[in-house]
Amino acid sequence: MAKIAIIGAGISGLAAGQILGKKHQVEIFDKASKPGGLVKCDRINDNLFHKVGGHVFNSRNQAVLDWFWNFFDRDKEFIKAKRNARILLNGKVIGYPLENFLHQLDKGLVSKILDDFLSNDYQPKDPFSYSNFAEFLKSNFGSTLYELYFKPYNEKIWNTDLTNIPLHWLEGKLPMPNLKEMLLSNIVLQEETEMVHSTFYYAKENGSQFIANRLAEGLKIHYNAEISHIQKREGKFWLSGSGPFDTLIYTGDIRKIGAILSETGVGENLPKSLKNLPSNGTSNIFCETDPGDISWLYLPDPDVKAHRIIYTGNFAETNSRGSNRQTCVVEFSGNYSFEFMSDQIKKLPGNLTPLGFNHEPNSYILHSSGSKELINESREILKKEQIFLLGRFAEWEYYNMDKAIEAAMLLEREIS
Ligand SMILES: Cc1cc2nc3c(=O)[nH]c(=O)nc-3n(C[C@H](O)[C@H](O)[C@H](O)COP(=O)(O)OP(=O)(O)OC[C@H]3O[C@@H](n4cnc5c(N)ncnc54)[C@H](O)[C@@H]3O)c2cc1C
């Protein structure tokens, strides 16, 4: 039995704690006062505010699903819902994904899109043969759809020029329809079925906070315990006076690990450029809205800084318990003030009334060329010292909750 310290009580740290706690003695440290990390929710006037995104759960991995449902009574505690996403394009609400709903666009626009598809230049290649995300999108969807939707929407969400984004982060994450599939969807009016969240599970009470709270049960977690320095004595780790630990699992921000390990002599071996990896924060404004049946509304319009509205009030009846309308979260990529966001939402549908807001400094990791190699090199250096990286910001991976759980399952094999 090893003594293991985990930094972070987000989904990654909680999953690792539950998995490794079966064989080892595990303690978790989190700077926050409750579990959940990015999936944390608060109640405002008894309405549920997802402080980041609008976390819903599903997975294509049966082992992850089996593991997850061991902790919950799926039928009693969760709702299974169908994703009902839409795009607000030039003032008109269109189906999602756009390429399956071209028949809802104006005739002139559809004609231009078809010209792109029928041109001799339209020859999509293997996605990973493109040098960047912009080239990939343009080549797969044609320049009309690219300029109309893919470019403005993705530039807002990633807050960067799309030519800066390499392709490898897409691996296994986005469906990549070919032309036949796109045309077929428009002719037989096929809906979105292939995406991991086309149907999803959602807790009846307290959303993703319910998930985090349940996964935290039975674990030894130190809250309000930010780990800024770790000591190493006689080969063992000490954290904030707790220890000795044989093994360390880090689920925090990889850019900070060098400083955290500076007193152990390990930090100086890590690549210096690690701390320059780019990321985006998000600002969320929580609102009351007129009722509707949409779950996500994507906002490509460059005149509005927000990139989507998540109608979290539609996910569970209890989410809008304190309102006689409905509730939703409007998400912005970047750091915006409450005043700015309150002004911006006047341009959006639903007569939005602000109830609260949150800024999360790190939500979306950004890959740049060489970032994968940088993480792999660091991972190997740390592994030799019995320090393991796990989770969205430590592994610098665009993980959803299920992928974070899967990563914790894989880590178990490395440790035991
Ligand atoms: C906008 C948005 C929407 C999303 N929507 C979905 C969705 O619908 N479904 C889905 O499955 N996934 C979704 N995700 C992804 C999901 O949030 C992540 O996969 C998951 O939360 C990652 O968990 P984590 O534990 O790796 O990281 P985190 O949640 O960031 O947890 C890390 C924890 O470590 C703590 N910590 C960090 N440094 C220290 C330190 N030095 N000392 C002490 N504690 C520390 C933090 O306080 C935090 O609690 C979304 C993500 C975003 C950004």
Image: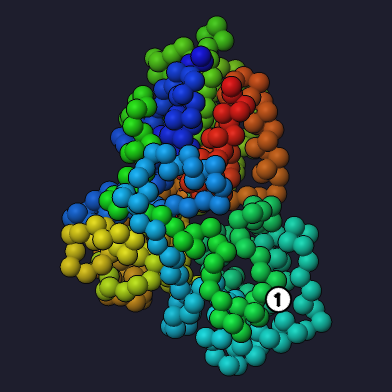
Q: Nearer the viewer, residue 93 or 345?
A: 93
Q: Quadrant of residue 254?
A: top right
**Figure check: 80 above or below 137:** above
* Residue located 43% across and 34% down the image: 14
**Figure check: 113 above or below 250:** below
Neighbours of disc 1 within 10 Å: few (<14), some (14-19), many (20+): some
Looking at the rendered structure, the kind of residue marked 1 is: Leu
Q: Quadrant of residue 317?
A: bottom left
* Residue located 20% across and 59% down the image: 321
Q: Nearer the viewer, residue 296 or 251?
A: 296
**Residue for badge 1:** 179
**Left or right placement of residue 242 versus residue 263 in this view:** left
Give coordinates of residue 148: x percent, y percent: 58, 78
Looking at the rendered structure, the number of numbered marks drawn on it comes to: 1
* Residue located 19% across and 54% down the image: 46
- Per the image, label 1 sits on a secondary structure element best described as helix
Image quadrant for the C terminus?
top right
**Figure check: 52 above or below 323:** above
**Left or right placement of residue 325 versus residue 142 in this view:** left
Where on the image, by quarter, is ligand 1? top left
